């Protein structure tokens, strides 16, 4: 593992400071090497090897042997999961402390370049023999070896264990930090991806011509009016919020223009409510009174609340004001129709869903909604059909099948009766 990769796991500057402090306290020089044995971090307070090692490493062959010793010692230490005390190829005592990440050996702390006993005559002979191939003057090697520190076995083990405990703590802390960095990086990547998506979407929207943007907005207005006529609470509120978001995006910095567009929206909603069966007298009175209130508003959020409250009033007028019991029955019928309009359902099946006889439900529904159950179902299907006809991928046959009609011919007759034109003529307006 190279410096950049190991630096992802721990702070090399912090490790250098630790090695500096360790040297000042013990006089022992430690370095950090990668899994390949090559040095990555050396202490500032002792940047060079001892004189003996410098003689050995003066030759490329000797230097490569040192790095090979570090690599093998690090592998042994990582295999056993503890400090590994070894004698290097040049005869010195050193120890390797493993640096492990998720169980993998990513590097080692190498420390030592000492002796553990006072040298005797045979030691000089052994040193000379071990380094004979390097062609270094034996007298130079022996003189340098005499300057080596002699450290007892107890102190060697204590120094090795101290570095091991420090390394374990640093690695554990670094792993937590690394995991946090990874999570932050992943979150940032997701956020950047979302931001890029939005930028791309904004670019696409900017590239659309004004006519297409206007048509999209008009389609939403038509869908809202359709939901109001059908007294669809959930659908009405959802599309209204979508429209308000569009208006805020376009006129958020111009409250007066925003107010004008919202008032235009309120006029359309009131008309749709009357078309849905609301009494014109109540709708007109509400519109006049609310216009006075709108004139006094200036904040965007206040204007949004104003139109939402008006929508709720008009929806209530479309539904009428039945008793609590009747209201629950009507709402359940409307919900059943909304969830099953694609199926070939009839009056009996709808009546069974609310545990009433078809006759009683017909009478109740007519009084409360101003139309029969089947008329409402037909109107609901036609409103859905109008939206589907605007999609060029939807054929008239496919629409008739998806909306519970017997066949395309039956669908065409019903649609023309309600809208005054055939589905084909209506579709040509949009495709």
Image: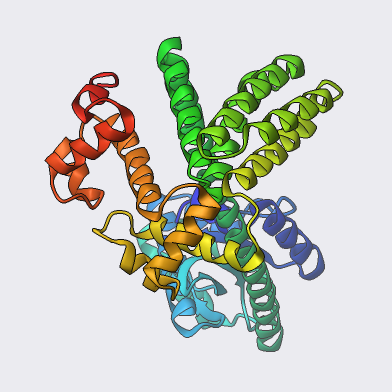
Residue 129 visible in the shown view: no
Residue in front for this viewpoint, 408 or 6: 408
Q: Residue at x 63, y 66 (%)?
A: 176
Q: With 385 as the anchor, is 329 left or right in this view? A: right
- Say which quarter of the image contains residue 115: bottom right
Q: Residue 208: x, y in percent?
A: 41, 15
List x then y, in percent, for residue 78.
47, 77
As displayed, is residue 176 above or below residue 16? below
Q: Position of residue 426 (x, y in %)?
A: 26, 24
Q: Is residue 406 left or right of residue 120?
A: left
**Which quarter of the picture shows residue 130?**
bottom left
Which residue: 59% across, 82% down?
A: 120
> Does residue 173 appear anywhere in the picture?
yes
Compare residues 316 and 196 and report the one nearer the observer: 316
Q: Quadrant of the N terminus?
A: bottom left
Q: Nearer the viewer, residue 299 or 347?
A: 347
Q: Nearer the viewer, residue 170 or 255?
A: 255
């Amino acid at each position: 593992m190279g410096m950049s990769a190991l630096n992802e796991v721990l702070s090399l500057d912090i490790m250098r400071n630790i090695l500096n402090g360790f040297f000042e306290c013990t006089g022992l020089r430690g370095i950090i090497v990668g899994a390949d044995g090559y040095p990555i971090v050396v202490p500032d307070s002792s940047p060079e090897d001892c004189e003996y090692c410098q003689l050995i490493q003066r030759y490329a062959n000797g230097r490569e042997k040192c790095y090979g010793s570090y690599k093998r010692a690090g592998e042994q230490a990582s295999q056993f999961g503890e400090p590994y005390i070894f004698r290097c190829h040049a005869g010195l005592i050193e120890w390797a402390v493993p640096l492990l990440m998720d169980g993998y050996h990513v590097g080692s702390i190498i420390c030592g370049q000492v002796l553990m006993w006072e040298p005797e005559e045979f030691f000089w002979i052994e040193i000379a023999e071990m380094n004979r191939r390097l062609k270094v003057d034996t007298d130079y090697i022996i003189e340098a070896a005499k300057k080596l520190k002699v450290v007892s076995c107890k102190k060697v083990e204590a120094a090795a264990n101290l570095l091991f405990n420090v390394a374990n703590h640093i690695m554990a802390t670094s792993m937590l930090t690394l995991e946090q960095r990874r999570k932050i990086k992943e979150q940032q990547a997701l956020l950047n991806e979302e931001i890029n998506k939005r930028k791309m979407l904004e670019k696409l929207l900017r590239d659309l011509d004004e006519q297409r943007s206007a048509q999209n907005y008009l389609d939403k207005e038509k869908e809202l009016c359709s939901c109001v006529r059908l007294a669809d609470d959930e659908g009405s509120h959802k599309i209204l919020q979508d429209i308000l978001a569009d208006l805020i995006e376009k006129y958020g910095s111009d409250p007066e223009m925003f107010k004008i567009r919202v008032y235009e929206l309120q006029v359309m909603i009131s008309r749709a409510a009357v078309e849905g069966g609301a009494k014109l007298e109540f709708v007109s009175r509400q519109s006049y009174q609310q216009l006075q209130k709108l004139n006094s508003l200036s904040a965007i959020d206040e204007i949004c609340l104003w139109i939402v409250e008006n929508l709720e009033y008009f929806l209530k007028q479309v539904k009428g004001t039945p008793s609590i019991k009747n209201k629950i029955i009507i709402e359940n019928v409307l919900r059943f129709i909304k969830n099953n309009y694609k199926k070939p359902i009839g009056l009996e099946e709808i009546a069974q869903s609310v545990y009433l006889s078809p006759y009683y439900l017909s009478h109740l529904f007519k009084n409360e909604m101003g139309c029969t159950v089947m008329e409402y179902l037909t109107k609901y299907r036609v409103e859905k059909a109008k939206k589907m006809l605007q999609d060029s991928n939807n054929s008239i046959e496919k629409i008739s099948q998806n909306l519970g009609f017997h066949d395309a011919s039956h669908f065409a007759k019903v649609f023309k009766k309600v809208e005054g034109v055939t589905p084909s003529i209506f579709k040509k307006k949009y495709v």
